[in-house]
Image: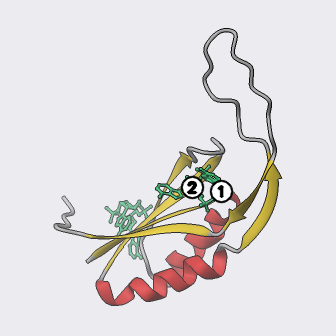
Amino acid sequence: MKLIMSIVKTDDADQLVHDLTQAGYRATTISTTGGFLRQGNATIFVGTEDENVESVLQLVKANCCTRSEYVSPLPPVMEPGEMYIPTPVDVQMGGATVFVLDVVQFERF
Ligand code: 2BA
Ligand code: 2BA
């Protein structure tokens, strides 16, 4: 069994979970925050048998298209007297960052 952990744009999460459940997969969504932009994203966990991993990945891929956005990262924590000049950066948004983990044990109580 595998646990597929997909970090996706909040905007893409609902449709992805809808498609996953329609396809018979169980999913859990948690609201998360990216470390770099510190903007909300969503992390979707799907526990499933090994043979289903590819099909889950296809659903993630189909729902999470990549697009480019020009954004200013939030200022870092600074010492008194330090100055921060915000520099907008071009980042690829959307898409999905996916980790597939081995499940050692699965229980339902
Ligand atoms: P964030 O950390 O907020 O990053 C958002 C996007 O900003 C990243 O998109 C990437 O295009 C860019 N970015 C991140 N760190 C950067 C840096 N040091 N320099 C330049 N650009 C940078 P994605 O790579 O698609 O990542 C989307 C979100 O997925 C991330 O949000 C983070 O929450 C998560 N993520 C990505 N890789 C991860 C990893 N190895 N471990 C844990 N979470 C990860
Ligand atoms: P939910 O997805 O909201 O599911 C709530 C309950 O609805 C489930 O309880 C189960 O009794 C039923 N259910 C869900 N999907 C079903 C389906 N396709 N067919 C028939 N009945 C279904 P639990 O199984 O105890 O799950 C409780 C919560 O644990 C789930 O909430 C979900 O958030 C998470 N979860 C369970 N299995 C998961 C898995 N394989 N991967 C990721 N998250 C899982």
Secondary element at tag 2: strand
User: Which mark is on residue 69?
Assistant: none
Q: Is residue 62 above or below residue 83?
A: below
Residue type at numbered disc 1: Thr
5 or 20, nearer to the observer: 5
Disc 2 beta carbon < 8 A from ligand 1? no
- Quadrant (top left, top right, bottom left, bottom right) of the N terminus: bottom left
At 77% from the left edge and 68% from the top edge, which residue is drawn?
A: 67
Residue type at numbered disc 2: Ala
Q: Is residue 85 left or right of residue 3?
A: right
Q: Which residue is mark 1?
A: 10
Q: Is residue 70 above or below residue 16?
A: above
At 80% from the left edge and 29% from the top edge, which residue is drawn?
A: 85
- Quadrant (top left, top right, bottom left, bottom right) of the C terminus: bottom left
Q: Earlier in the sequence, mark 1 or mark 2?
A: 1
Measuring from the top left, give residue 45's x and y in whole percent: 42, 64
> How many numbered callouts?
2
Residue 108 sits in quarter: bottom left
What residue occupies the far top of the structure in this picture? 80
Disc 1 beta carbon < 8 A from ligand 1? no
Measuring from the top left, give residue 39's x and y in whole percent: 66, 44
Q: Is residue 68 left or right of residue 105?
A: right
Task: Assign ligand 1 to one image quadrant.
Answer: bottom right
Secondary element at tag 1: helix
At 30% from the left edge and 75% from the top edge, which residue is drawn?
A: 2
Please, which colouring scheme is shown?
secondary structure
User: Which mark is on residue 42?
Assistant: 2
Q: For the residues marked 1 and 2, what is the alpha-carbon distance in whole angstroms?
A: 5 Å
Asked if the residue at tag 2 contacts the one at tag 1, i.e. Cβ–Cβ closer than 8 Å, the answer is yes
Measuring from the top left, give residue 94's x and y in whole percent: 69, 65
